Amino acid sequence: MSSSRAPTSVYIPQKPNFGNPYPPIRPLTRHPASNPRTTKPTLSTSKTKPLNKSQLTMTQKRKTTMGEVPPEVFEMLGEKLEKMIELKMENAKLQSESVVEKGNGNEELKFELDKTQNELRTATERLRGLSNEIETLSLEKNSMQSQLEIMKRTVETANYNCEMEKQLHTEAQFKLAQLVQQLEAAQGELECVKTELAKSEDKLLVSEKERRRLHNEVMELKGNVRVFCRVRPPMKRDGTAVDVIDENNTVIVKVTNYNGKVEKLRFGFDRAFGPSSTQEIIFEEISQLVQSSLDGYQTCIFAYGQTGSGKTYTMEGEEGKPGMIPLTVHQIFSTIEELKGVGWQFKVRVKYVEIYNNNIFDLLVESNESKKLTIKYIDGNVTLPEASVVNVDNGKDVDGLISIAVRNRSVAETKYNAHSSRSHSVFIMEIYGKNFSSNEQRFGGLTLVDLAGSEKVDEGVRGERLEETKNINVSLCALGTVIAAIANKEGHVPYRNSKLTELLQPCLGDESKTLMFVNISPDNEDVSESVSSLRFATKVNTCVIGTAKRHVK
């Protein structure tokens, strides 16, 4: 009876294609044996359970978390999911019906059912994997969107900062351009000021030179002995008592009187030089006087002061710092070379002697061969006929003679100086010039004197040192007496009281232009000797020896 019934076909919808390698489910054909019998069996009332609440919640949650995914994707997934659910329910129903109707009678249907269940299980797993992948991609997308927003804000901030930097840069360039213009204007003004300052300095220098020239002329017309004061650098650490005011050539000495009060003594000279003055600066002041020796005048420069006050340094100098004697000699020969261009020819002769213990010795011969020299008067002129006379042609020749003289000069250690000069040295240069164009002849001369230092006789000094000190002080005292007699215009001037004043007689008479350096120490312990030297120099400055005569033919 059941065999006469045609098989009934049941359509099962195909599984959505998610890329599953398995073939789609084929429609199942019900076997005739599975047709319902006359007696209707009791069907199982069990039905496929619908999706529970947690499953629906998960589905909704996935839909919620994937809200950022394009809606077309979710619609497609939703349709496929509904079809899968329907397919699952249908398969479950068919399985139930098949089990009831078939029982264990048809292995083929069971195999197909197992296969279908496996495919359904696989599809479900793949669907779950796709859902998880979609959720992960959504999270990544949200993260990337957050990062994108941050990067956008960063770029916006960077753009803003860049704009601000551009604005600041533009402003800075504008300010820089203004500053450059101001700087250029200031530099232009500075150059103008420098030019004006240079002109003013030149005018001031010219005015100062003119003032000095006029002053020298006035002093020469008056016949005064000019006096320059030089203060050496301090050697002690107990302070100084001497100040120099360059503007008015004043020397101020601070002394303590008998009442214990500090007084300031002021001394004015033709020029005053402080401790920082160099040899070149000082020589510039006497260069005009030196030039006079080539013009037919007798000129004399001598240095006076206590032991250790810098007299020998001023006159002779030291290595790399030549003094007045070598600088004077080199200027004379330099000028002689210039005068050759206008027809002048000169002959120069040099003598170098010392006065030691009131006796005159030749410094250009070895000390063991030197004999006492005697002053002679020839035609009323003071001469030393026995002294060595050396013809010199240039400054180097004179430098060699100075070296010999320095080596032969009498020196000794004193309280104030380890190599103190114990004699007066006298450098004499005789200059004869003739112009072959005009036949004019000039007879000039230059005498440079480095006096021995004055000092008090200590109780412990004995023998040779005592004799030297006495003779030095006696000769300097005689010089002071001569100066006083000249200053007071006395009828008799005692030149022959010492060899020093007798030899310097031409320099202190009306035949010469004379300048004296008074060298002093600024140290507090030397203030008494410094004041004594300054007072003597002031007396010398008042001496009128008459207008110098020029010796020409």
Image (cartoon, grey):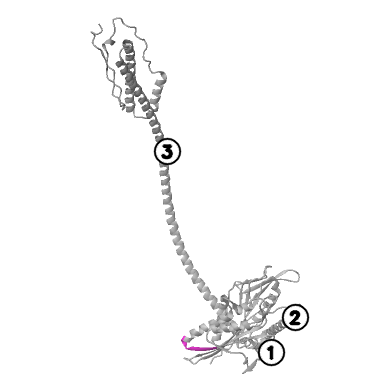
Which residue is at the far bottom? 379
Badge count: 3
Which of the labelled discs sits on residue 462, or is there none? Answer: 2
Which of the labelled discs sits on residue 150, or is there none? Answer: 3
Q: Residues within 10 Å of mark 2 (few under 14, many from 20)?
A: few
Q: CA distance from mark 2 to mark 1?
A: 28 Å
On the image, the x and y values in percent for residue 503 come to: 65, 88
Residue 179 in the figure: left or right of residue 535: left
Q: Is residue 493 visible?
A: no
Residues in magenta, as a range: 341-348
On the image, the x and y values in percent for residue 251 come to: 64, 73
**Mark 2 vs 1, N-terminal side:** 2
Q: Which kind of residue does numbered mark 3 sit on?
A: Ile
Q: Which kind of residue does numbered mark 2 sit on?
A: Arg
Q: Residues within 10 Å of mark 1 (few under 14, many from 20)?
A: few
Q: Quadrant of residue 371?
A: bottom right
| Helix, strand or loop for disc 3 | helix
Q: Residues within 10 Å of mark 3 (few under 14, many from 20)?
A: few
Q: Quadrant of residue 326?
A: bottom right
Q: Which kind of residue does numbered mark 1 sit on?
A: Arg
**Mark 2 vs 3, N-terminal side:** 3
Residue to which mark 1 is pinned: 496
